[in-house]
Image (cartoon, rainbow, N blue to C red):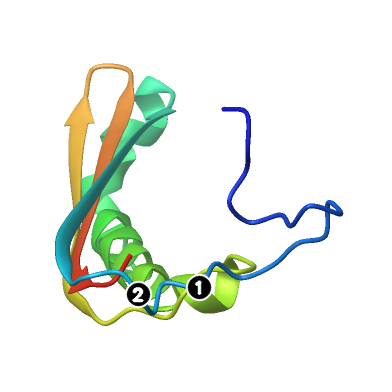
Amino acid sequence: MSKLSHYDRKGQARMVDVSAKSTTLRTAKAQAFVKLSKEVLAALPANPKGDPLEVARIAGIMAAKKTSELIPMCHPLPLSHAGVDLAIEDAGVRITATASTAGPT
């Protein structure tokens, strides 16, 4: 990429002006894999304080709702959907997050 949209000609960070853009539907998807020992994986369902994967799911959705507060120069956009799916696999947990919005992005 020869030009980064969040920097002006002087190299100073700026917020991109999207006021002239039309409304479009955007969906983002991100995935991560958290490697865990067999002992930790086996202990997940028996956690006496509740299901840690449900806590992670809620934390991920809450973080998506705060994206513009967490990422500098990010436009605050109304989310039409935010979801986090967690799947236990042999060596850990696969996390897939999705978010959707309709707006000038």
Q: Is residue 76 above or below residue 61?
A: below
- The structure residue drawn at horizontal position 40% and vertical position 34%, both measured from the top left corner, is 40
- The reply to whether dot 1 and dot 2 touch (C-beta < 8 Å) is yes
Depth check: give the residue in front, 105 or 2: 2
Residue under circle 1? 17
Depth check: give the residue in front, 72 or 16: 16
- The structure residue drawn at horizontal position 20% and vertical position 33%, both measured from the top left corner, is 88
Residue 39: which quarter of the image?
A: top left
Q: Residue furthest right?
A: 10
- Residue 6: image x %, image y %? 63, 56
Depth check: give the residue in front, 52 or 47: 52
Picture quarter with the C terminus? bottom left
- Residue 54: image x %, image y %? 24, 62
> Residue 20: which numbered mark, if any?
2
Q: Is residue 92 above or below residue 82?
A: above
Q: How many marks?
A: 2
Q: CA distance from mark 1 to mark 2?
A: 8 Å
Q: Residue furthest top?
A: 90
Q: Amino acid at mark 2?
A: Ala
Residue 24: which quarter of the image?
A: bottom left
Query: Mark 1: few, some, or many residues within 10 Å (few <14, many ≥20)?
Result: few
- The structure residue drawn at horizontal position 35% and vertical position 75%, both measured from the top left corner, is 20
- The structure residue drawn at horizontal position 62% and vertical position 43%, both measured from the top left corner, is 4
